[in-house]
Amino acid sequence: MKRDIYPALQSWKEAKDRKPLILRGARQVGKTYILKKFAKENFENYIYVNFEEEPSLKTLFEGDLNPEKIIQNLSLLNNEVIDPQKTLLILDEIQECQEALTSLKYFNEDKTKYHVVAAGSLLGVKMGQGRGFPVGQVQFLDLFPLSFNEFLSALNKEPLRKKLSETTLNNENPEAIHLICMDVYKTYLLVGGLPGVVNAYLSEGNFFKAREVQKQLLIGYQADFTKYAPKTDAIKILHLWESIPQHLSKENKKFMFKVAKEGARAREYENALTWLNDAGLILKLQNIEFPGIPLTAHKNKNIFKIYLFDTGLLGALANIDPGILVQKSGVFTAFKGALTENFVIQELVAHKKSNLAYWTSSGTAEVDIVCGYKGENFPLEIKAEANKKKKSLKVFGDKYDYEVLSHISGRNLKKDGNIINYPLYLASLFPDLSD
C-alpha cells in the first residue's frame, strides 16, 4: 500500500545530520507496515524488535545503555551482523520499554553511524508523562490514516489522483470528473483510512466486511483504555469516547462533559480527555471569538469540539448502517454532517494544516474552521451537500474585512466573487488556492 510518508523516510536516511527517528501515530494506522517496507527496499537487512510482542527483549536495554553494547546483543540474538550503514534497527512499540526510549539519546551522539527508527502507538501518552524522554535528541514523523489522495492510490486510481493534483482555479475539473470524485468521497466517508479496513473493503468490495474490521478495531481501542490508562481514568476515557457521536449529532457540536456522564465536571475528566488526545485517537477543535494572529493565542481552552481521528471509525462508533451509501444523498443527511466535518478536519491535519479552530460570534454566527497557515488565518465553512448558503461566512468576512473566503461542499470548484468553493474531495488543497 502506497503511503505519502515514504519520501520523508528516504530523506531521513540520507540526511547528514540524521537523528534517531520516531514514527508517531495511533494504533492501526500502518506504522509497522511502512517501516518494514522501507527497510526491505532501502537497506540490505533490518533488525525488528517489538517490545509488546516480546517483553523479554527489554532486558537487552537494562543497565548500560551504550549503543555498541545494545547492537552487539541484538546481533547475537538475531545471529546476524549489524552493519551501521546497511542495517536498519526498528524498535516497535517502544513505549513499552522506557530504557529503550532513553537509549535513543545515546544513539544520537553519532548521528551518521547507526540507522535507528522507533515507533509506538502511545508515545504521546509517554511524552505527556515526561519521564526520561530524549527531548531534542530525536526526529519525529507522524503517520495518519490514509488521506483521500492515498485512498485513491489504494483504489488504483493514480491518473485521477494526478488530475486532481493539477487543479487550480483556472483549471477546474469537468463535471463528469467531479461526479466520479464525489462517489469515491462517499465511499471514503464509510471506509475511512485505516489500512486494515481499506484492505478489507478492497478484498471484496464490501462495506459490511469493512465494518466488521472497524468493529474489531473499536474493541481493541477500548481494551487499550483498560490496559494502558491509569485505573482511575479508564472508565472516564470510555465515557468520553462513547459520547463523541452523541456530541456530533447535535447542531451545536460543542463538547460538554455532562453529556458523557450525567453530573460530570471538567476537572474530573480533564486527564481522561488528555489521554485520548495524546493517544492520537481524537481531534480537538477549540473555539475562538476573534481571529487574531497567532491563532493559537486566541483559542479558548474551555470551549471545543471533539472529532475522531478517522471518519470511517466515527461511522462505526455511531453505528451508521453502511447500506446508507446506496440511498440517494442519505449518507449526507444522516448524522447531520458530522462525517463531513470530521473528514475535512482529518484531511487538513494529515496535510500539516493542524492549527485549526472554529469561530463563533455571540451565538448568531459560526464558521466551522479557521486555519492558521503561513502567517495568516483562513476561514472555511463546511456543507455536506451542494449547499450554496454562506451566511455565517459572509458575516465573518464583513466583520473582519477578509478579501478571500472559502466554502467547501458537494459543488464543483468555483469562485463566486471573493468566495472560493472547494469540492469536498479537494479539502487538502485548502487554503492553498487562496493565494
Image (cartoon, grey):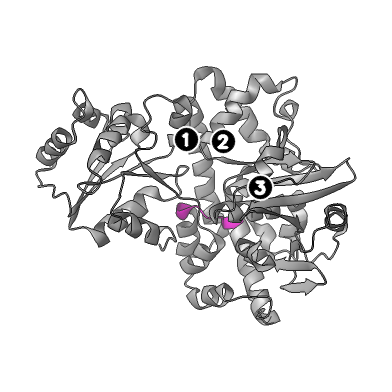
- CA distance for labels 3 and 1: 19 Å
Identify the residue shown where x is 68% and y is 38%. 297
Q: Is residue 143 above or below residue 54?
A: below
Image coords of residue 335 (percent x, y): 74, 49
The magenta segment is 190-196
Q: Amino acid at mark 2?
A: Asn
**Residue 356 tag number:** 3
Q: Is residue 378 above or below residue 281?
A: below
Q: Amino acid at mark 3?
A: Leu
Does the CB distance between marks 1 and 2 fall below 8 Å? yes
Image coords of residue 215 (percent x, y): 54, 44
Determine if the magenta segment contains residue 194: yes
The kind of secondary structure element at disc 2 is helix
Residue labelled with disc 1: 124
From the viewer's perspective, is the residue at label 2 or at label 3 nearer? 3
Dividing the picture into quadrants, the one containing residue 308 is top right
Does the CB distance between marks 3 and 1 fall below 8 Å? no
